[in-house]
Image (spheres, rainbow, N blue to C red):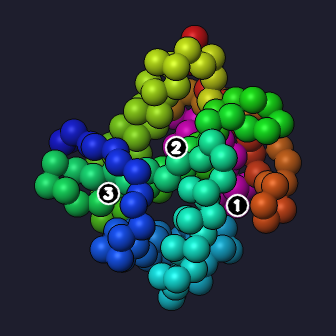
Amino acid sequence: MSTLSLSPLRFSAEEIAEVVDLYASNPEYWRAAGEHDPEHIDPDRVEADLRAEAGTEGCEVLLARDRQGRLVGLLCLLDRHPTDGHPWIGLLMVHGGSRRKGIGRMLAGLVEERFRGEERNGVRLAVLENNPAALTFWSSLGWQEIDRRADRQHDRPCIVMHKQLT
């Protein structure tokens, strides 16, 4: 597996088109999440959603590229959750054409390494209850369920997971 590079989303038209393609390659996720029509990902809405995410204090939207410069993933990170103070992964999405190649595992590892380097003792995320594949993925990486509750933004049932970093 080639090395991945992470860079902040700069919101160029080319980058938004790449993210729209990444979103379109994950129709199962969008069916479960309900945020986008999986059959028609609207570029304007994608850009607006990501600008809102990136504009939130402590949030970052990062693009993951392979050695050839192809977009293979997207990360949305929150430095400090307002309720628990932990860093959170808001979204980790791998391009549908790049699944099952270790990219998700590599991205999760990069996030964990980053927060370990900042001497954070743990990181959290929420998995939609209707997305058992995601629960299996995160559990396989050593994340543990710590709570079940609705997400703050869309009131969907979620499983809150935690990974101890120290």
Residue, disc 3: 72
State yes or no: residue 137 in magenta: yes
The span shown in magenta is: 125-140
Amino acid type of the residue that numbered disc 2 sits on in the rendered structure: Phe
Q: Nearer the viewer, mark 3 or mark 2?
A: 3
Q: Secondary structure at mark 3?
A: strand
Residue, disc 1: 130
Between 92 and 11, the one lying in front of the other is 11
Location of residue 163 by image quarter: top right
CB within 8 Å, label 1 to label 3 = no
Q: Earlier in the sequence, mark 3 or mark 2?
A: 3
Between 134 and 49, the one lying in front of the other is 49
| Whole-number angstrom distance, CA of label 1 to CA of label 3 | 24 Å
Amino acid type of the residue that numbered disc 1 sits on in the rendered structure: Asn
State yes or no: residue 89 in magenta: no
Q: Where's residue 149, x and y in %?
A: 85, 48
CB within 8 Å, label 3 to label 2 = no
Amino acid type of the residue that numbered disc 3 sits on in the rendered structure: Val
Does residue 124 lie above or below 57 as drawn?
above
